[in-house]
Amino acid sequence: MDQKKIRSTNRFTTAEIARMALVTGLYVAVTFVLSVISFGAIQIRLSEMFNYLSLYNKKYILAITLGVALANLSSPLGWIDVVVGSISTLLVLLINYEITKRVRNMKIKMVITALVFAFSMFTVAGQLKLFYQLPFFFTWGTVALGELASMLVGGVIIYWVGQKVDLKK
């Protein structure tokens, strides 16, 4: 059979898979190292900064979603947080990708992303309301503010790294 006619069925190269695994691992590691502030009604999950990588390359949506699922294995809510958190992250990353894909200015894309993710914290507030009877709107506010803080600090870091390293790979 002619080699030129054989097509690869792999969607990602080995290098891309390695980069995605690195992002997944970094998300989990940062969440674990800062686990004392990564879960609960008042949380600052600095690992959320990796959400910005999806602005550089869509493939990181999978890596980040897997990172959230693995990190949430240590959540006090257990499997509920693994399922709800990772599905919510996937959906918000996909929605955010659609919202920002035509925006050319990276700083504006990052501001939009921070706001979208802060707003999306109603899913966390819903879980905390359901399982701990915490007040929904107050909890949504505290978790959203923590998310916004994480995204602002993380945004500066990722933007700076993006100036030094090609994050589009």
Image (tube, rainbow, N blue to C red):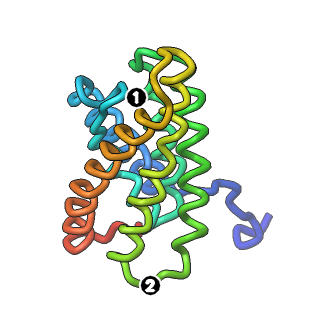
Quarter that holds the C terminus: bottom left
135 displayed left or right of 44: right
At 37% across and 38% down in the image, what residue appears? Answer: 143
Residue type highlighted by circle 1: Ala
**How far apart are the alpha carbons under marks 1 and 2?**
32 Å
Q: Residue 107, relative to residue 46: is it above or below? A: below
Percent of width and height locating residue 121: 47, 42
- Nearer the observer, 112 or 48: 112
Dot 1 falls on a residue whose secondary structure is helix
Q: Quadrant of residue 40?
A: top left
At 32% across and 46% down in the image, what residue appears? Answer: 145
At 70% across and 67% down in the image, what residue appears? Answer: 3
Percent of width and height locating residue 133: 50, 17
**Residue that extends furthest to the bottom in the rendered view of this protein:** 104
Dot 2 falls on a residue whose secondary structure is loop
Percent of width and height locating residue 4: 71, 73
- Nearer the observer, 14 or 93: 93
Counting other residues with Cα less than 10 Å from the Cα at mark 1, is it few (<14), some (14-19), or many (20 or more)? Answer: many
Residue type highlighted by circle 2: Arg
Q: Which residue is mark 2?
A: 104
Q: Which residue is mark 1?
A: 71
